[in-house]
Amino acid sequence: MKIITLNKSSCALRYVDVESTRCVLGTNLHIPFDWHPCNVIFLGSLDGMVCVCLCNTGELVVWNPLTRVFKILKNSNSQGFYNMDNDSLTFCVDFAGDYKIMHIKCTHFRLIVNIYSFNEGSWSTPSFLIYSPYDIAIYSWSIGTFCGNSLYFVLTKFWCLGNTAVLRFDVESKVV
């Protein structure tokens, strides 16, 4: 298992081999897309893939640091660019082995949920949160955690400290 580290002072990306008995710090990783490491924010990872946000543009890039393969995800009008202050993102994989990225965009009044399918190469907009109690922008959404075919999010009301909820989204049935 390897962990990627980012040294903010030198903007160097390196990996740490945590399975090594000495926890060896690996060589510098080079970002294969044309961005400086200090302008990249890590949003999530799954099975060696990393999703990053390009700070200056809000574009999303999926990258495998070991193979150096990357893909800049196209943006749809409804999905838009990633907003570091309001949006949430997570990886998951369904029973068919299709890797997906869920992007939850918090607008002024509502949520817009979009799911990118790697098999289809496009975004879709599921309706699982429409007209639910969580379909309003009074909650701050955590980055999602994928576990056992479900995505888990911690929701916190903006003005009420301690008023939190955990939301479970079933990846297969697309039900909260």
Image (cartoon, rainbow, N blue to C red):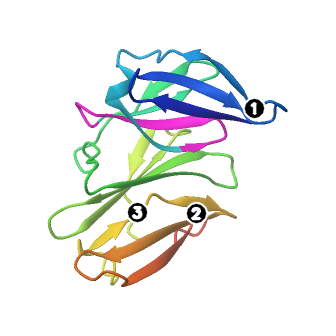
Q: Amino acid at mark 1?
A: Cys
Please tell me which residue is depicted at 54% across the width and 68% down the height of the picture.
152
Boundaries of the magenta span: 45-58
Of circles 3 and 1, the one toward us is: 1
Q: Disc number at residue 127?
A: none
Write the residue at 62% across / 27% down.
15
Q: Residue at x 25, y 48 (%)?
A: 83
Disc nearer the start of the sequence (3/1): 1
Rendering coords of residue 22 (x, y %): 80, 30
Q: Are marks 2 and 1 in contact (CB under 8 Å)?
A: no
Quadrant location of residue 135?
bottom left
Sequence-wise, the earlier of marks 3 and 2 is 3
Gap in Å between the C-alphas at discs 3 and 2? Answer: 11 Å
Compute the Cα span from label 2 to label 1: 35 Å
Residue in view at x 49 percent, y 77 percent: 166
Is residue 176 in view from this perspective? no
Q: 28 left or right of 39?
A: right
* Amino acid tagged 2: Val
Q: Quadrant of the N terminus?
A: top right
Q: What mark, if any, has residue 23 been given in the picture?
A: 1
Q: Which residue is mark 2?
A: 171
Above or below, comparing residue 134 to residue 85 in the picture? below
Q: Disc 3 designates what residue? A: 126
Q: Quadrant of residue 48?
A: top right
- Quarter-wise, where is residue 38 in the image? top left
Callout in the foreground (3, 2): 2
> In the structure shown, which secondary structural element does the residue marked by tag 1 occupy?
loop
- Percent of width and height locating residue 171: 58, 63
